[in-house]
Image: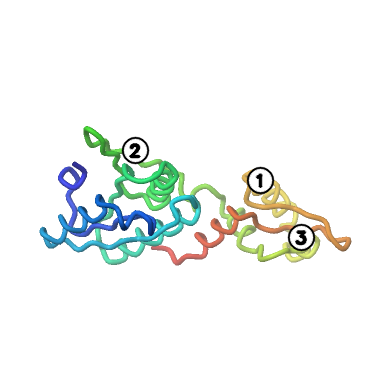
Amino acid sequence: MAMRAIPFDRLVVITSQDNTFRDEYQDILQINRISRTPVETLMVDKFDLMGSFAAIVNSIQHHKEMRDKVAINISGGTVLLADAALLAAFQTGVDAYHVDDRVIKLPVLRNASIEERLSSDQRRTLLRLEGNTDLAALQKEAGPEAARTLKDLRTLKKMGLVQVGLGDGVTWVSLTRMGEYYRKALQRPSR
């Protein structure tokens, strides 16, 4: 139903390697071969939320660079993969649909992208962290903005993006796995 209800000139199937052997996947390829619609397959680990999210965001941005109008159907696959696709739609601002017995266009949340979620100071602080960063050195580097940097670090820690540890008489600050994804997203060239 989704293939008839949501018009498209190119299809990107987001799936895991094990699903490429399923009849449903082969049917999608065959239908699009007959209609001469280009199909790409984006392989993801259907149990890795952040890895799938990052791969989907990269694919969306790639197609936006090609001037494609992009929409995403979150109906198929695992719940985790659907969540990753929906988060990617929020991050990139593309239309998202859920198709069951009918087509439902989902609302695109504003202020949900990584860039919009953090203040410019928080983004700057996050980007300054690489590996284990000495908190005292970070404060010294911040100079008169040291108090602001500490406040930003506390906020980033509450958001689960930063962790603090002690070792060798030094307070270390580092990014969590989620913080690393945020950092990578912030380092991407603006689209």
Q: Which is closer to the viewer, label 3 or label 2? A: 2
* Quarter of the figure with the N terminus: top left
Q: Where is residue 11 in the image (x, y as percent from the top left)?
A: 24, 57
Residue 126 appears left or right of 35: right
Q: Where is residue 128 in the image (x, y as percent from the top left)?
A: 65, 64
Foreground pick, 94 / 9: 9
Q: Mark 2 points at which residue?
A: 107
**What residue is rendered at 11% in x and 59% in y?**
34
Q: How far apart are marks 3 and 2 (CA)?
A: 41 Å
Disc number for residue 189: none
The answer to whether 163 is drawn above or below residue 64 in the figure is above
Q: Position of residue 27 (x, y in %)?
A: 20, 53
Question: How dense is the environment of label 3, judged by Cα within 10 Å: few (below 14), some, or many (20 and up)?
Answer: some
Q: Earlier in the sequence, mark 1 or mark 3?
A: 3
**What residue is rendered at 30% in x and 39% in y?**
98
Q: Distance between the residues labelled 2 and 1?
A: 28 Å
Regarding mark 3 in the picture, which secondary structure is present there?
A: helix
Residue flagged by tag 2: what amino acid is it? Pro
Q: Name the residue under label 3.
A: 139
**What residue is rendered at 30% in x and 62% in y?**
63
Q: Earlier in the sequence, mark 2 or mark 1?
A: 2
Regarding mark 2 in the picture, which secondary structure is present there?
A: loop
- The reply to whether callout 2 and callout 1 are in contact (CB within 8 Å) is no
Residue flagged by tag 1: what amino acid is it? Thr
Residue 143 appears left or right of 115: right
Q: Mark 1 points at which residue?
A: 155
Question: How dense is the environment of label 1, judged by Cα within 10 Å: few (below 14), some, or many (20 and up)?
Answer: some
Q: In which quarter of the image is residue 174?
A: bottom right
Regarding mark 1 in the picture, which secondary structure is present there?
A: helix
Q: Which of marks 3 and 2 is nearer the N terminus?
A: 2
